[in-house]
Image (tube, rainbow, N blue to C red):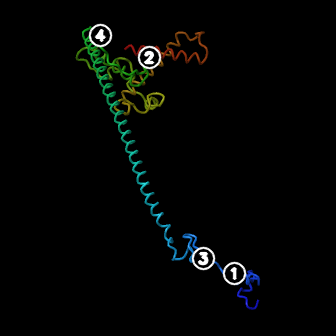
Amino acid sequence: MANSNIPRSSTQREPSGFEMVEAIVQPRAPARCSRCQELGHTIASKACPLRHAELLPVAGMATTDTTDTAVEAANIATAAASTTISIAAEAIAKASANIAAAEASACTARTSAEVVDSITVIALSSSLSAPSSPLRPSSPLIRYNDPQAIYQRYVDVREAWYKAQPRGSIKTNQQYQKAIGLPARYDERSFEWCLDYSQMGKRCTNSTGPREWTKEEKMAYLDWDRAENERVEALYAENPLDPGRRGVGDIWRRIEDDNRVQQSLYSRR
């Protein structure tokens, strides 16, 4: 143990005497290369003639792989080109078919349009050749109690009165009011009342845009409201004890009926 070369911290044991004698009696066999199977060197020795033999097959395999890859890529490219050509040919065929269908549809539409135009011309010729009554311009339906409708009736009646007067007589709005028995003026409270949202409203709205009501328009509305109140009171005075009245609902029904009658009278003018 004193001549041992193994450090004390190692767990390796010393060779036994038998092992040492065995090693001396039986000499070591010469080394044999596992690659070329020759004696005198190992596989890692530079003397081995086949030391770099593994590089040659690798190079050959690499060349073969590269060639195979190139061939495969060429085949894929050829197949892709063939597919692209097929798709393009199919798309061209479909486009040609669509163009032909569109041309046929356009031709049919032109033919239909020509037929419709011919029918229209014939119908117009027939309508022009046949006697017809004069057409009246259509106008939007306006309620009889609309402020603009009320003022238009006021103007129409005034114009009729002007035409009925003898030539050379004074024809003014004041003269018309005096002749018909209309008030010549109203107080400010009446003008404020007629501009309420439930009556005329603050502003007049027409095709040219909103504007202020004129004094003559407000007076025409007040004249109409006074005449309506007198008309309703006269209807009630004709039969104040009518047994047919049945509460508030009946009153509203009578009001609706009266509105329909007044609207019908206004529409016939």
The tally of labels here is 4
Q: From mark 2 to mark 3, how far is it between C-alphas?
A: 132 Å
- Label 3: how many residues lie within 10 Å, few (<14), some (14-19) or many (20+)? few
- For the N terminus, give its image quadrant: bottom right
Residue 133's mark? 4
Q: Mark 4 and mark 1 in contact (Cβ < 8 Å)?
A: no
Query: Which of pointers 2 and 4 indicates the residue nearer the eye?
Result: 4
Q: Which mark is residue 31?
A: 3
Question: Circle 1 sits in a helix, a strand or a loop, which is it?
Answer: loop
CA–CA distance in space, label 1 to label 2: 143 Å
N-terminal of the pair, mark 3 or mark 4, is: 3
Q: Secondary structure at mark 2?
A: helix
Which circle's residue, 1 or 3, is located before the other in the chain? 1
Query: Which residue is label 2 attached to?
Result: 263
**Foreground: disc 1 or disc 3:** 1
Query: Cβ–Cβ below 8 Å for labels 2 and 3?
Result: no
The residue located at (42%, 24%) in the rendering is: 146
Which of discs 1 and 4 lies nearer the camera? The answer is 1
